[in-house]
Image: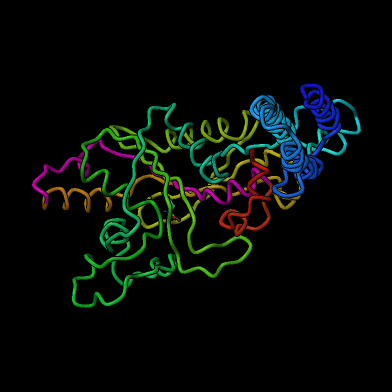
Amino acid sequence: MGDAVAQVEARFNEEIDSVSDAEMLEAFRVRWFGDKAGLINKGVASWVRELPRELKPVFGKQFKNFAGGVERTLNERRFEIERGKDFHSSSQLQSSNLDLSLPGIRRSVGVEHPLTRTMREMVAVFAALGYSVGVGPEVETDFYNFEALNFPPNHPARDTQDTLVVADQESKPLRERYLMRTHTSPVQIRSMVANDPPLRLVIPGKVHRNDESDATHSPIFHQVEGLCVDRGITFSDLKGTLDHAMKAFFGSSVKTRFFPSFFPFTEPSADVQISCPFCGGNGCRKCKWSGWIELLGCGMVDPAVFQAVDARRVENGLAPAFDVPGISGFAFGMGVERIAMMKYGVGDIGQFYSGDLRFLDQFL
Ligand code: PHE
């Protein structure tokens, strides 16, 4: 009797050794452990029927040991196959689901958006000069966005800003009406109203204009603004600061040049060009073959701005501090998208806002 069980066991072991995948394992399980036709159940049934009564308990015990053992063996085999662990031969390797030639799972690491990076790098240049970072609201009042910056009501300079105004405010005085800020310059006013000079501020932020979207325009874009107010600040401080900043940002070989311009809140005003950092001024696609790239607007703070600031300070119960002899300052502002497009060779501003990973992946 014991021999019979041992023989069955040997056969079982031989067969299970050749089981190499889940399909074979299932066939094996049905053959041996199947409810009706399985060898174990069938075997038990037929053998037990033929045994003399007194042998039945002994045989039962032996068979129970065997059946318990083989069930464990079967489960172990199943575990090995599921884990793809047990490869006795290359044919087993091929028939398994594991393909070692597939590339691994790469987890992409998040990085700064190119616009955020450009803003941060620009801010860092001024932070190194002792500037602190200023911020202000994107929904602004007419007073901060225009009036205090010397854009009087109905002045044609307002037309250049393509303002998006908040509707249904006609019952309010003009200076209290809300609009989407058209530039970061209102933060100059807010900062001067709240703080005494000296002030050195760099102001990164989002601005809004009623501009049609095209390859170089977007109704929402970003600026980095600067303001420096102290005793005896002159135009040469402005030139020196911006020349240094452009060299720090674009490389020490870039040159700057200043052209007369107009902004209501600076007098005199200038537009600044830098020699093309890509071709060294020889002319290339990025500088449209001119060797120069126009980058920012700037100027000396107009006295009318200091007057408006002090008037608001007095309304707020503070002493006037800016429209006083000896105090002067400069301001500048630049478009972040323009700089980033140039720096990274981006031809369409819309790419920055698309959220398309095929575009953004390039900045990893
Ligand atoms: N605010 C101006 C603009 O948006 C730029 C500027 C800022 C010019 C500060 C001079 C000084 O066009």
Where the N terminus falls, by quadrant?
Answer: top right
Nearer-the-camera pick, 263 or 295? 295
Q: Quadrant of residue 180?
A: bottom left
Q: Is residue 66 magenta?
A: no
Q: Quadrant of the C terminus?
A: top right
Residue occupying image coordinates x 73% and y 46%: 34
Observer-nearest residue: 318 or 357? 357
Residue span colored magenta: 316-344
Q: Seen in the image, is 170 located left or right of residue 181? A: left
Q: Is 148 located above or below residue 251 in the figure?
A: below
Indicate the quadrant where residue 123 lies: top left
The image shows residue 149, relative to residue 255, as above or below, that is below
How many marks overall? 0
Q: Residue furthest left?
A: 317
Q: Look at the image and say whether residue 326 sits in the magenta stretch.
A: yes
Decide if residue 309 is on the left or right side of residue 132: left
Any part of residue 181 in sight: yes
The image shows residue 158, relative to residue 310, as above or below, that is: below
Q: By what rule are the colours in the image chosen?
A: rainbow
Residue found 79% across the figure and 40% down from its top: 28
Asked if residue 356 lies left or right of residue 314, the reply is: right
The residue that appears at 81% across and 33% down in the rendered structure is 100
Residue 79 in view of the camera: no
Where is residue 252 shown, x and y percent of the image? 62, 28
Q: In x, y percent, where is residue 55?
A: 69, 27
The location of residue 143, given as percent across then percent down, is: 25, 60
Displayed quadrant of residue 291? top right
Q: Which of 7/183 is in front?
A: 7
Q: Is residue 189 above or below residue 164?
A: above
